[in-house]
Image: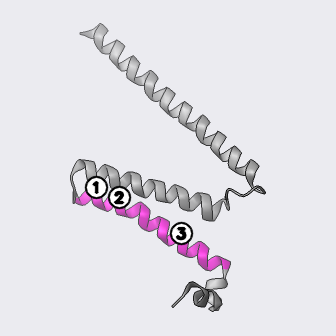
């Protein structure tokens, strides 16, 4: 069964079918890390890897299938704006983390 055969079936041409299918995939990618953590199936390092892998897959699915973002010339400014937004978010996140870590280190040295 090829992909072209699947496209000929009417349900696979329905746009809402793909939304529902992607939603189900995202729900599975959300529940699976919780299940792995709760059941403590793997070591701590493998659990972290599974969580991060599911996170990256979710981000890619959102970018490609819900934001309709691709790297063509037509969508160049959309891609640039998403990359810029991710840059600003990462600066805020890692900057806040750095400030909190330094505050914790400096306050701990004053108390002791």
Residue 89 vs 12, above or below: the answer is above
In the rendered structure, which disc, 2 or 3, sits on the residue that comes first in sequence? 3
Q: Residue at x 58, y 88 (%)?
A: 6
Please indicate whether residue 98 sits to the left or right of residue 106 in the image.
right
Residue 40 vs 44, above or below: the answer is below
Asked whether the beta carbons under mark 1 and mark 2 sit within 8 Å of each other, the answer is: yes
Which residue corresponds to mark 3?
23
Q: Estimate how packed mark 2 is, as few (under 14), some (14 to 19) or many (20 or more) residues with alpha carbons within 10 Å.
A: many
Q: Estimate how packed mark 1 is, as few (under 14), some (14 to 19) or many (20 or more) residues with alpha carbons within 10 Å.
A: some
Which residue corresponds to mark 2?
33
**Range of magenta residues:** 15-39
Q: Residue at x 60, y 72 (%)?
A: 19
Could you say which is closer to the camera, residue 16 or residue 80? Answer: 80
Residue 108 vs 34, above or below: the answer is above
Q: Position of residue 56 (x, y in %)?
A: 47, 54
In the rendered structure, which disc, 1 or 3, sits on the residue that comes first in sequence? 3
Please indicate whether residue 38 sits to the left or right of residue 32 in the image.
left
Please indicate whether residue 18 sits to the left or right of residue 35 in the image.
right
Q: Position of residue 25 (x, y in %)?
A: 48, 69
**In magenta stretch: residue 19:** yes
Q: Position of residue 9 (x, y in %)?
A: 62, 91
Residue 17 vs 42, above or below: the answer is below
**In magenta stretch: residue 79:** no
Q: Position of residue 94 (x, y in %)?
A: 48, 31
Q: Residue at x 76, y 55 (%)?
A: 73
Q: Which mark is residue 37?
A: 1
Could you say which is closer to the camera, residue 73 or residue 106? Answer: 73
Q: Estimate how packed mark 3 is, as few (under 14), some (14 to 19) or many (20 or more) residues with alpha carbons within 10 Å.
A: some
On-image quarter of the C terminus = top left
Label 2 residue SS: helix
Majority secondary structure of magenta residues? helix
């Amino acid at each position: 069964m090829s992909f072209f055969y699947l496209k000929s079936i009417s349900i696979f041409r329905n746009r809402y079918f793909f939304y529902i299918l992607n939603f189900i995939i995202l729900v599975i990618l959300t529940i699976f890390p919780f299940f792995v953590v709760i059941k403590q199936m793997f070591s701590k390092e493998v659990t972290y890897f599974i969580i991060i892998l599911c996170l990256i897959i979710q981000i890619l699915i959102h970018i490609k299938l819900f934001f309709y973002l691709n790297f063509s010339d037509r969508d160049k400014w959309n891609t640039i704006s998403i990359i810029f937004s991710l840059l600003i978010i990462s600066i805020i996140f890692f900057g806040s983390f750095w400030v909190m870590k330094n505050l914790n280190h400096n306050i701990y040295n004053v108390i002791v």
